[in-house]
Amino acid sequence: MNRTLSRLGVIAAMALGSLTSLSAFASTNVYSGTLVLPDGRNTRFDQAQAGSVYRPIVDAQASVMSKIKSAIQPKIKEALQSVNGAVANSAASTVSGPVYLQLKNGVASFWGLQATGSVRVQQSKLGVTVTCQVQATINSSTRVNGTIDPYTGVFTFANVENFSVTPSYTCDTSLDWIPFVNIVVDAIVTHYVDQAIADGLRAAYNALGEVSKLAPVQLMGLDTLPNNLFVVNGSDLWPSFKSDLANAFWSIDLTMTIGDPKHYIHGPTGYAHTATSNDPVFSLNFNGYNFALWDNRTYIDEVFCPNTRVQPYCYFF
């Protein structure tokens, strides 16, 4: 880290006399892969993220989540912006994972998306204008069901289960006629968002076929991993995993997790310390096999500034 910038931050903290950790940087970035076989044998292979053999899997995960978000977020914004009384350009939406896929005898189900949307709406009565922020949260247990072609990997939509939207709102006044917002919320839930989300999910999950290569062994870049990464007592476990996956892919009960790393830092606050972030990237479970890949990072807070006027200076860590 640039020490000049650090010292400038220290001077600023001295002036404020605040308790703060001025800088945090990832000192180690590691992909951690684990493999468990039905007979209980298991091992892990960790590797620095730069130039890692796991990169194709990470790229596939990022591409899948990008496809899903780009298909659904505009749909939510468009739906909310269409509500009567919506303030121009006030609609916003967020979509995040992880996303789960279950494949059983060619029938596929996806669930787990966390999607929200919000919009500002205005209504006037008796010369008074009220502005409310309305939010709609989509039930993350919403399941999109369909089938996957065993040759092309294309997902064909069948139906949506458990779709629901939880609304909430806050307004800038508490006038008695505020219930008009209930009408807006009803319009969001009944006439706009439900269909928009269904359409968005169909488009997004259909894209999984081309992005993640839903075909035996090629799944999410697994075919790129070399042998001799997962070795127990001189025995390489990876060929057995690939062989069983290829031979039974369309007749097994398979569950896949596509992660969406957030890199939230976990650890103490208020003093110089080491903290971590641990994010699932991808996992696959079938017939007693389990493969999982994690994005693990360690962070070091370099500067600690006590909240005291007796000692208004900082320590380098």
Image (cartoon, grey):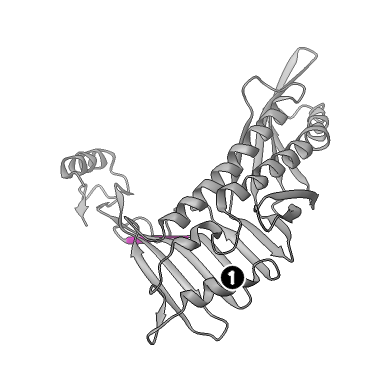
Eyeballing the image, is 42 above or below 82? below
- Residue that carries the numbered disc 1 in the rendered image: 245
Q: Can residue 264 be seen in this view?
A: no
Foreground of the two, 82 or 10:
82
- Asked if residue 154 lies in the magenta stretch, the reply is no
Q: Can residue 46 be seen in this view?
A: yes
Please tell me whether mark 1 sits on a helix, a strand or a loop.
helix
Residue at 74% of width from left, 66% of height from top?
105
Secondary structure that dominates the magenta span: strand
Instruction: Write the start and end of the magenta stretch as one range.
Output: 274-279
Amino acid type assigned to the residue bearing label 1 in the image: Leu
The quadrant holding residue 100 is bottom right
Spot occupied by residue 28 in the image (x, y as percentages of width and height) = 31, 60
Residue at 57% of width from left, 66% of height from top?
284
Spot occupied by residue 145 in the image (x, y as percentages of width and height) = 76, 54
Spot occupied by residue 51 in the image (x, y as percentages of width and height) = 32, 56
Eyeballing the image, is 125 above or below 10? above
